[in-house]
Image (spheres, rainbow, N blue to C red):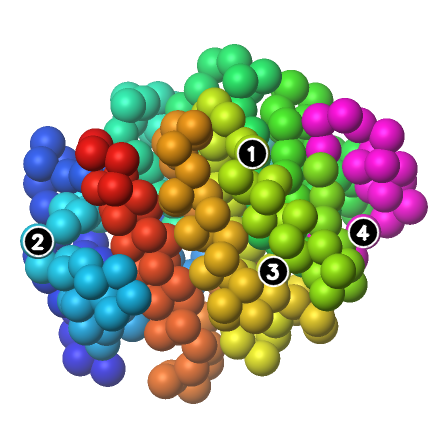
Amino acid sequence: MESFPENQFLPTPSATFDAADVVMVQLPLEKTVSYGTGTSGGPRAILQSSSQIELFEEETGLDFQYSPKIHVAPPLRFDPTESLETALGQIRDFMRPLRGRFVFGLGGEHSLTYGTLTGLCDDLRDVTVVQLDAHADLADTLGGLKWSHGTVMRRLWERGCRFLQIGIRSLSREEFEVASTSDRITLYYAHEFPRRWPEVLESLRRLEGKVYFTLDVDGLDPSLIPSTGTPQPNGLSWRQTMDVIRGVAENPKIDWFSTDMVEFVPSPHPPGCDLVAARLAMKVLAYRQIGLRNRGK
């Protein structure tokens, strides 16, 4: 692969911070992965492979040469000797000055969502997390750890967040009971999609207020992105994933203020699914931009 600037998404120069519509933040966090490793290399691989994507997006008609303007921030550096809690505090502190900007976090393990969200918002009771994921991440502890990629949504739930979880197909009895009894969690299992998919889309249309969209790539079927730490069969198809993204983007009643894409592990033999992950990030930004344009923003 040709050399490519570290701080650039797509084959177009990174916008200045002040001129940007989107601030893309590289978060190569990897401290508590519990099976496959390598997610710390995800942000760089996604940026590098994005150089092979055309700037014209055919579904939306958007030309990324002109819009949206994307500023790619340098990657955060995490001390391997420090705890996950310390790393999450570092992310939180980095995000606080970005309030009011649309932030796209490239990960990195899923625990980074806690640092990003708490940095961008003080009162999480006003936030709905739309989570596309194979795992509920609602465990109180995982492997004896209270802070982990598998406990991140539990910690956010304790802070008052509401959840719309889509594509779940791996969780413990404890997580099942939390999700089943909480009035702040709406969960759609992947095996229910044949009969409940219209309900999934209707739930997206009913959302109101602040929305944080977190996209764990293991939510997609592994035939699309097998390169993730804990892949699970029976995930979302590409078209279902686009339906979810579009459902968030087209809802005029929400303030979609930030998103992240996590748990991608670079393929060891490119060209692999690195390009699929980069294309997925592009789709998120394209649908969001068209949604804003249609609402006159």
| Residue 115: x %, y % from top left | 49, 31
Determine which residue is flagged by label 2: 66
Determine which residue is flagged by label 4: 171
**Residue type at tag 2:** Tyr
Residue 176 vs 163, above or below: the answer is: below
Distance from Cα at disc 2 to Cα at disc 4: 43 Å
SS of the residue under disc 4: loop
Residue 133 vs 231, above or below: the answer is: above
Distance from Cα at disc 2 to Cα at disc 3: 31 Å
Marks 2/3 in contact by CB < 8 Å: the verdict is no
Residue 292 can be seen in this image: yes
- Please tell me which residue lies in front, 4 or 178: 178
> Residue 64 magenta-drawn?
no
| Residue 135: x %, y % from top left | 70, 53
Q: Earlier in the sequence, mark 2 or mark 3?
A: 2
Q: What stretch is highlighted in magenta?
A: 168-185
Determine which residue is flagged by label 3: 219
Q: Which residue is drawn at 34% across and 67% down?
A: 279
Determine which residue is flagged by label 1: 206
**Residue type at tag 3:** Gly
Q: Earlier in the sequence, mark 4 or mark 1?
A: 4
Q: Earlier in the sequence, mark 1 or mark 2?
A: 2
> Residue 184 magenta-drawn?
yes
